[in-house]
Amino acid sequence: MPDSPTEIIRLVNVSKGLYDLNGQTLNRHNLVLSQVNFSLEQGEVHVLLGENGAGKSSLVKMICGAIRPDSGQIFINGKEMTANDPQQALASGVATVSQEFSLCPNLTVAENISLGRTKYNFAGFLDFPAMRALATHQLNRLGAGQIDVNRKVKHLPVAEQQLVEIAKALAANPQVLILDEPTSTLTDNQVEILFRVIHALKDSGVSMIYITHKLKEIFEVGDRVTVLRDGRSMRTVAVAESGNIDDLIQLMIGSKLDNLFNKGKHQVGETALEVLDLKSDPASPALNLTVKQGEIVGVAGIVGAGRTEFIRRIFGIDSYHSGSVTVFGKSLPKGNPQAAIQAGIGFIPEDRKRQGIVPCLAVRENICHVTMRQLSRLGWVSIASRSRLARTYVERLKVMASSLRQEIRYLSGGNQQKAILGKWLSANARILIFDEPTRGIDVITKSAIYRLMVELADRGVAILMISSELQEVVGMSDRVYVMRSNRIAKILAGEEINGETILRYAMGGDEVA
Amino acid sequence: MINRFTSVLKAKEAGIIAWILLVGLVSSILSPNFLTPNNLVNILAQSAVVGIMAIGMTMVIITGGGGIDLSAGSILGISSVVMAMTIIPPELFRDTAAMLVLPNDFWIILKALIFCLGTGAVCGFLNGCMITWAKLPPFIATLSLMAAARGTAAYISAGIPTYGMPTSLVYVGQGSISFIPIPVLVMLALGLIVHLALTRSVFGITLFAVGGNRETARFSGMNVNRLLISVYVLSGVFAAIAGVILSARGNQVHPDAGTGYELSAIGASVIGGTSMMGGAGGIPGAILGAIFMAEVQNVINILNIPVAYMKPVLGGLIVMAVLLDQWHKKRDTGE
């Protein structure tokens, strides 16, 4: 750190309610950020640490001027930011490398990097040589001189897109650089170069906010670290003094009450689902997984650890290179969801609206979509038999709908989720895969869904659950597979299952020693 | 009784029924020739060809994802040419009045009908393959088949129309049972079958699921490609049936027959409440839409309005009907 640190950015008691896409506050009581204090000094790398949904992205958006706080003050270079004006943030030298790339896929690398700093020649036309020179220079700094600046961004692999994104931010000569998980797609070698660039920038006085889920990186580049939890800033410590990684993890999790769960000891039966050496492509790590009847198996990991991709391959939505998926001793063909369903697997997907329901159709039809063949005679299926089936599950799962004919899109997220569950129960699914079972669902329906899951497991259904909510994984699972960068980092069972251990493996704490 | 009445008012076809009645009311005030039994039957008969095509088109549009069949008019053309050439012996191919001398041989006519519908099915299958396996947008796939089928029809018939058909086929186009023209009966029968299939069969439920959300359909284990192919095959077959009716009604087969009819069929579907976004729509609406378009053309004839006005008026009416329908839906859902 420099000898006389000067504060570049200061947030004082900043709060923000739940907001919409435009940053307009929807609900002032449901706080995304609550009384947050944060400061960034010149020439430091300040790491933001927190679980999914802890408020890291909102904090960063506020500094960029994309959203404005409901209360509290933001100072940049000692000057208070008054309006939510991204221009003001830009003018004071804030540049962002975001997870969702801000690149134009149809423009070339050179055009993207010089976007906003477009150069013109004497005739008033775009000065392509100057733009290419700028792009080449910035990419060389990142040791990525091999990237052809004349290629369109959409033709680059993701890792190179990430490097272009970083080069674009560097081209702005920022005073403050925000890096949101910049290494998630990079190779070890690229990460090393990026860290060298970060150290060089630091030496020239640039301040950086660094968001990461990889604990190892905190110690490699961080000066100070601020832990966020449930929208509050828990503590800011100097990395050199933080010492124990477990303290940081403890701060992230806190001690949460989990009376939502009433996990019993399930009677575990024969192996229902077995995945052996599944490789998505020849070079990728082999994945193994088993779920027994009556067992609830959790799959934990940070966003981008490859959980959903893994599960989609098991269900056959995507194909894979080698390995096998076996259901009750019968091997499933690759990339064939119909076969998976016939073998007794049900899939409750993460993106309810796009993969779980047909929004414009009635609750009744949505429930019957898998079972209609069994209901049908010679391809015909009467309305009465569909209504009977749907009513059974609407009543059993207590789906709140005005009628069976109500379009499912008018139901709340929780009731939609129950209807989707009804769809699979009606098909007598013996293996249920839940991907983020309670995302966006209110707490009462949540506990109802947990109860249903336990009830199903008690009746011998094998349950595989992916979740980013730690307390859900801890509260529900008999065993937990922790995934990190497309491999299974650790399998936990029984007493080993707790938030600290899961996070440590999910974030690579075991690598830090 | 009152309940039943209000449920008719609330039905999704209420809008199009109101339009048909409104235009009918205005026309019967303006002309004494409109509200006569003969004229009303005539309107129904006029609507049959487009109505039958609209049944297939409606299913195609319900599949969503830009589903549309621009080749329907050309399929009508090529399949009626194939039918004529199956009936006519090769030595009379170039004789425009060849069919006049043809006997009513049941087996020859049956063979001709099978070849005709088969041609429609093959064309539809080609559409389906281009859309599912080659992943072409339906607009492009069917546009290319529209040109290819029309060109092939002109090639195999040497561009020469054929006049005269076996009398039993002519009866299908021009005869009536009691007072209802046979083309209307064909349209209603096909409409009823498809309507029941859409509401009460695995095929129908799959169609609406795929149209409403293709991803969810896949996650529910539905074979999306097989459904798409069968829907385009059906659209081709319905276009071919429309070709039989058109040839029989006019007692002639022309390689240019049905040009532009695909647009009328799309219009009928959309006026009848089928959403271009997919996932919503129905056969009753499509048939009523076809009847509405026939009614408007009939009124323009009766009132001696210059034919040049006909298409602009139809265009305007399509826009108005769809706007009104959107407004109606918005009010219903309270959005």
Image (cartoon, helix red, strand yellow):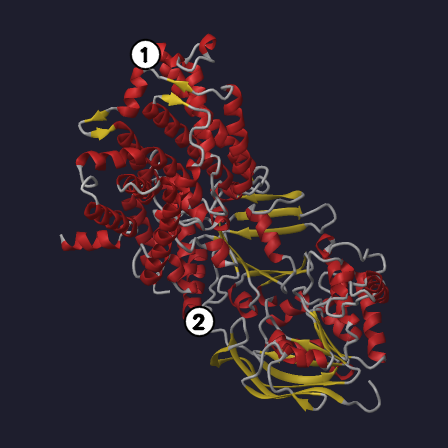
Q: Position of residue A234 (x, y in %)?
A: 62, 83
Residue name at image x 32 percent, y 11 percent: B104
> Which picture quadrant has residue B103?
top left
Output the chain of dot 2.
A
Residue name at image x 52 percent, y 37 percent: B142
The answer for how far apart the CA atoms under marks 1 and 2 are is: 75 Å
Number of residue marks: 2
Three-letter amino acid code at disc 1?
A: Asn
- Quadrant assignment for the C terminus of chain B: bottom left
> Which picture quadrant has residue A54?
bottom right
Q: Which residue is mark 1?
A: B104
Q: Position of residue A462 (x, y in %)?
A: 49, 53
Q: Is disc 1 in contact with disc 2, using a CB cutoff of under 8 Å? A: no
Residue that lies at the very extreme toward the left in this rendered image: B1
Disc 1 crowd, CA 10 A, few/some/many (<14, 14-19, 20+): some
Output the chain of dot 1.
B
In the rendered view, does B299 fall on the left or right side of B83? left
Residue name at image x 77 percent, y 73 percent: A172
**Any part of residue A247 in sight:** no
Q: Give residue A261's mark.
A: none
Residues behind callouts 1 and 2 on a single chain: no
Above or below for A46 versus A270: below
Three-letter amino acid code at disc 2?
A: Val
SS of the residue at dot 1?
A: loop
**Any part of residue A296 in sight:** yes
Q: Nearer the viewer, residue B319 or A289?
A: B319
In the rendered view, does A437 fall on the left or right side of A7? left
Above or below for B81 versus B226: above
Q: Which residue is mark 2?
A: A443
Above or below for A44 versus B215: below
